[in-house]
Amino acid sequence: MRPVVLRTRRLVLDEPMPYDAEAVARYCQDPLFEQYLTTPWPYRRADAEAFLGVHVPESWATGAELTWALRLAHGSQLLGVISVRSGEHEIGYWIGAEHRGAGYMSEAAVAVVEWALGGGIPHATTLRWRAVEGNVASAKVARAAGFLRMHAEDPTLPTRDGQGRLPAWHAVRTAPADPAAFASWNDILGEAA
């Protein structure tokens, strides 16, 4: 598959490139990444170079994982990254600390979800989202993109080293037949019902 460019009101989502390595390395050294993501830790420049130079282009070519860089429509600076693993139909994302709070990731997530479920990923009728328990910012993005919390059979995620499991939240973008399968976002987002 060839990389697809998506546009929103404020953003251009395009393929992350090797010239983004410095920004990726800097953003991924954020202590929140150690706590909530499965990226390598400590994160080094070599990790960013391998991600951008090997993983991203190979994954687009095979269709295994479709990864976009978030950039402002009028600039080229990398703000963050969003991807969909097409085999699992699972969305994941992160954004640099200085770009948080402006709604960029929610805007990007809506665009990626609409593209994926609108035929961008053939036969995709459902997208999944998972996050380590406590990652409220990620949950807010998932809710903004229309995901509905669900009770998972295995409410965990593998640890970074693959040797253990972490408690996790789960959601889907399309509704299952039984509405009772959904849980409220309110308890994890600290909001009143």
Image: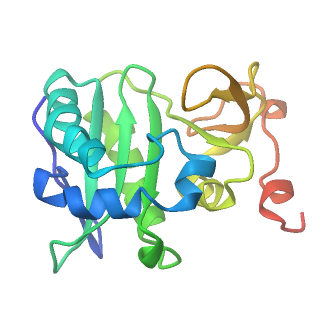
Towards the viewer: 139 or 127: 139
Asked where in the image residue 192 lies, by quadrant, the reply is bottom right
Q: Position of residue 55 (x, y in %)?
A: 23, 32
Q: Position of residue 80 (x, y in %)?
A: 35, 61
Work out whether residue 64 can be spotted.
yes
Q: Is residue 64 left or right of residue 97?
A: left
Towards the viewer: 69 or 43: 43
Is residue 191 positioned above or below 167 on the image? below
Asked where in the image residue 124 lies, by quadrant, the reply is top left
Q: Residue at left 57%, top 35%?
A: 174
Q: Residue at left 20%, top 45%?
A: 49
Q: Position of residue 16 (x, y in %)?
A: 19, 52
Work out whether residue 7 can be spotted.
no
Q: Position of residue 121 (x, y in %)?
A: 30, 30
Asked where in the image residue 117 lies, by quadrant, the reply is top left
Q: Is residue 151 left or right of residue 14?
A: right
Towards the viewer: 108 or 15: 15
Q: Residue at left 57%, top 21%?
A: 162
Is residue 129 positioned above or below 69 on the image? above
Q: How many marks?
A: 0
Q: Is residue 150 left or right of residue 29?
A: right
